[in-house]
C-alpha cells in the first residue's frame, strides 16, 4: 500500500486559519513589520523635529544673549575711557583769594603757598 | 566734609578773631579727632584765648560766612581733595614729599630771578 504523501486540502475556517501560518500569515507579518517600521520612522521624525525646534529656540536665545553682552561690553568700554583729570590743572596759574585768611610770614614774600585743608 | 570738621573750623576762626589762629591750628592737628565742644573749649583755654569771647563766637556762628566762602573758593578752583596747595598759583595736590615742594618753589624763584637758597643752589637748583 503507498503512503499518501500529500497534505490533504483543508477547507473552511480551520483551513484558513492553518493556511495563515504560510501565505496569509507571512503577509500579515510583513504588513505588521512594515507598519512597525513606519511607526518607528514616524516617531524618529517627530522626535528629530522636536529636538530641532528645541535647538533652534536655544540658538535664538543664545544669539540674543550674545547680542546683549555685546551691547553691555560697548557701554562698559565707553565708561572705562579715561576721564579728564580731576582737580586743578597743574599747568595753569590760579589766583587764590586770600583776604582775611590767616597768614604766616611777610605778605610781600616772593613765594606764596596757599594751603587748602580741613581739620578732619 | 567730616561732621567734626565744621565745629573745629568754626573754633579755628574764633581763635583767628583773637589773633591766635596758628596756635589753635596746631592744637587741633595735635589733638585730632578729639573735636567735641568741651574739647574745643579746652584747647581755647590752653592757647590762652578769652573763653567767653570764644564761646560767643561759636554760639553766634560767626565763623560760618568765612568758612562758606572758603568752601566756595575751593570748589571754584576745582579742588576735590585735601590738602591741596597752590605755590604762586601753581597747583600741587595732596601730601607730597618735601622735594616736590622744593622743585616747584625753586622753579618759581628762578622764574623771578631770585637767587636760590644756598642748599638748593648746591643741589643744582633741582
Image (cartoon, coloured by chain):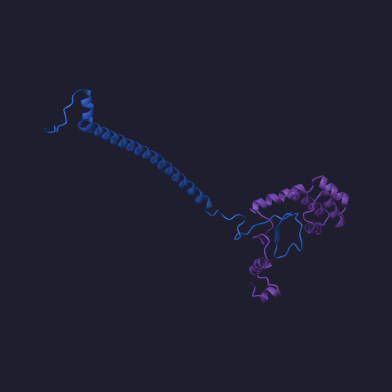
Q: Residue at x 43, y 44 (%)?
A: A62
Q: Residue furthest top?
A: A12
To which quarter of the image does residue A11 belong? Answer: top left
Chain B: drawing colour: purple
How many numbered callouts? Answer: 0
> From the viewer's perspective, is residue A51 above or below residue A76?
above
Where is residue B1 shown, x and y percent of the image? 71, 49
Where is residue A22 shown, x and y percent of the image? 21, 33
Chain A: drawing colour: blue
Where is residue A9 shown, x and y percent of the image? 16, 27
Q: Residue furthest bottom?
A: B122
Q: Nearer the viewer, residue B31 or B26?
A: B31
Q: Residue at x 26, y 35 (%)?
A: A34
Image quarter hosting the N terminus of chain A: top left
Give left or right: position of B8 versus A48: right
To which quarter of the image does residue A110 belong? Answer: bottom right
Q: Residue at x 37, y 37 (%)?
A: A50
Amino acid at each position: 500500500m503507498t503512503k499518501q504523501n500529500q497534505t490533504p486540502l483543508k477547507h473552511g475556517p480551520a483551513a484558513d486559519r492553518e493556511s495563515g501560518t504560510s501565505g496569509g500569515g507571512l503577509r500579515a507579518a510583513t504588513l505588521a513589520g512594515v507598519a512597525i517600521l513606519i511607526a518607528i520612522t514616524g516617531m524618529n521624525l517627530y522626535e528629530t523635529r522636536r529636538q530641532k525646534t528645541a535647538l533652534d529656540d536655544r540658538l535664538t536665545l543664545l544669539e540674543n544673549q550674545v547680542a546683549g553682552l555685546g551691547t553691555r561690553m560697548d557701554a562698559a568700554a565707553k565708561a572705562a575711557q579715561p576721564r579728564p583729570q580731576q582737580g586743578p590743572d597743574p599747568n595753569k596759574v590760579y589766583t587764590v583769594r586770600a583776604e582775611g585768611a590767616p597768614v604766616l610770614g611777610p605778605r610781600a614774600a616772593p613765594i606764596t603757598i596757599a594751603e587748602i585743608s580741613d581739620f578732619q | 566734609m567730616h561732621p567734626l570738621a565744621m565745629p573745629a573750623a568754626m573754633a579755628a576762626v574764633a581763635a583767628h578773631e583773637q589773633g591766635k589762629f596758628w596756635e589753635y591750628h596746631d592744637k587741633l592737628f595735635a589733638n585730632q579727632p578729639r573735636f567735641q565742644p568741651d574739647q574745643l573749649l579746652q584747647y581755647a583755654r590752653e592757647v590762652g584765648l578769652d573763653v567767653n569771647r570764644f564761646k560767643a563766637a561759636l554760639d553766634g556762628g560767626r565763623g560760618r560766612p568765612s568758612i562758606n566762602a572758603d568752601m566756595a573758593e575751593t570748589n571754584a578752583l576745582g579742588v576735590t581733595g585735601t590738602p591741596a596747595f597752590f605755590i604762586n598759583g601753581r597747583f600741587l595736590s595732596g601730601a607730597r614729599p618735601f622735594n616736590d615742594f622744593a622743585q616747584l618753589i625753586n622753579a618759581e624763584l628762578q622764574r623771578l630771578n631770585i637767587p636760590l637758597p644756598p642748599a638748593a643752589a648746591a643741589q643744582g637748583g633741582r
